[in-house]
Image: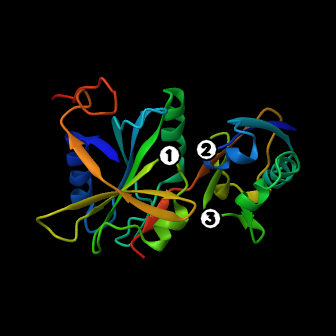
């Protein structure tokens, strides 16, 4: 299952500056593992303690994967996976 | 330094006042690489909280895609502190992940006087920067040729 992965500015140091890269997998977890094999260090930025890192949002097409099974969310051939930094903060 | 039009400053402060005591948040987009904030987008604070903010992830995807399609980037990322000074908290720093953005904080703790300050936050290091408020970018040193949105 080949998917197109869109990489945010903050993570492009891992992809040689590329905005989008290809990866394979039938779940988000598999795609991330394949991404990490091609672009070392990406997984640590996306996954923590077996779940999606709170600092990132990952979308399959238009869907935030947190609402559709997290790392186990399924992806199909030709889907696009978008990574964005979560924008959050607060006074504490 | 952040050079920003007065109407955008006024609009950020108005947004922060309107959402007080909850934190308000949003972005000001500008042409990629220009460092010139032009188009303000108020974002939903998905937390609706006086002590925390988080962009709604679905709205964020839509807004980020629109910026991408228009060759824009988030030049300013702003939010308000409603009971404390306009300085980034530890949480703000831990989430800051746009190395090219100016992180603007507006404090609304005083009902009459607002405080607006700007920071660069790169690799966890906070650097405050001066803010120059201008009527238009035409005569500012950004080299832009923009004029204020009238009406």
| Residue found at x 22% / y 71% | B109
The secondary element bearing badge 2 is classed as helix
Q: Where is residue B133 drawn, in percent x and y?
A: 22, 44
Q: Where is A60 relative to B94, above or below?
A: above
Residue where numbered disc 1 is placed: B100
- Crowd around label 2: few <14 · some 14–19 · many ≥20 (10 Å): some
Q: Where is residue B135 drawn, in percent x and y?
A: 18, 35
Residue where numbered disc 2 is placed: A9
Image quadrant holding the C terminus of chain B, namely: top left
Callouts 1 and 3 in the same chain: no
Task: Report the label total.
Answer: 3
Q: Say which of B28 and A70 sits in front.
A: B28
The secondary element bearing badge 1 is classed as loop
The secondary element bearing badge 3 is classed as loop
Q: Is residue B53 left or right of residue B97?
A: left
The answer to whether one can see residue B100 in this image is yes
Q: Nearer the viewer, mark 1 or mark 3?
A: 1
Q: Mark 2 near mark 3, Cβ–Cβ under 8 Å?
A: no
Q: What numbered label is drawn on residue A54?
A: 3
Q: Where is residue B117 drawn, in percent x and y?
A: 30, 59
Determine the image quadrant of residue A55. bottom right
Q: CA distance from mark 1 to mark 3?
A: 21 Å
Name the residue furthest left: B112
């Amino acid at each position: 299952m080949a998917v197109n992965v869109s990489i945010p500015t903050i993570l492009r140091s891992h992809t040689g500056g590329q905005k989008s890269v290809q990866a394979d997998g039938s779940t988000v977890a598999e795609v991330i593992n394949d991404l990490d094999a091609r672009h070392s260090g990406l997984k640590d930025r996306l996954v923590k303690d077996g779940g999606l890192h709170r600092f990132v949002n990952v979308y399959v097409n238009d869907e935030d994967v947190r609402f559709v099974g997290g790392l186990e969310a399924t992806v199909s051939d030709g889907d696009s996976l978008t990574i964005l930094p979560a924008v959050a903060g607060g006074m504490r | 330094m952040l050079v920003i039009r007065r109407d955008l400053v006024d609009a950020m402060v108005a947004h922060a006042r309107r959402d007080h005591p909850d934190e308000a948040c949003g972005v000001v987009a500008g042409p990629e690489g220009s460092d010139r904030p032009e188009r303000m987008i108020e974002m939903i604070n998905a937390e609706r909280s006086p002590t925390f903010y988080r962009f709604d992830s679905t709205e964020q995807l839509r807004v980020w895609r629109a910026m991408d399609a228009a060759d824009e980037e988030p030049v300013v990322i702003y939010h308000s502190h409603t009971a404390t000074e306009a300085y980034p908290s530890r949480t703000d720093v831990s989430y800051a992940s746009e190395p090219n953005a100016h992180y603007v904080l507006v404090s609304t703790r005083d009902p009459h006087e607002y405080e607006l300050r700007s920071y660069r936050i790169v690799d966890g290091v906070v650097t405050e920067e001066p803010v120059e408020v201008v009527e238009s970018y035409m005569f500012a040193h950004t080299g832009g040729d923009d004029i204020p949105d009238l009406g």
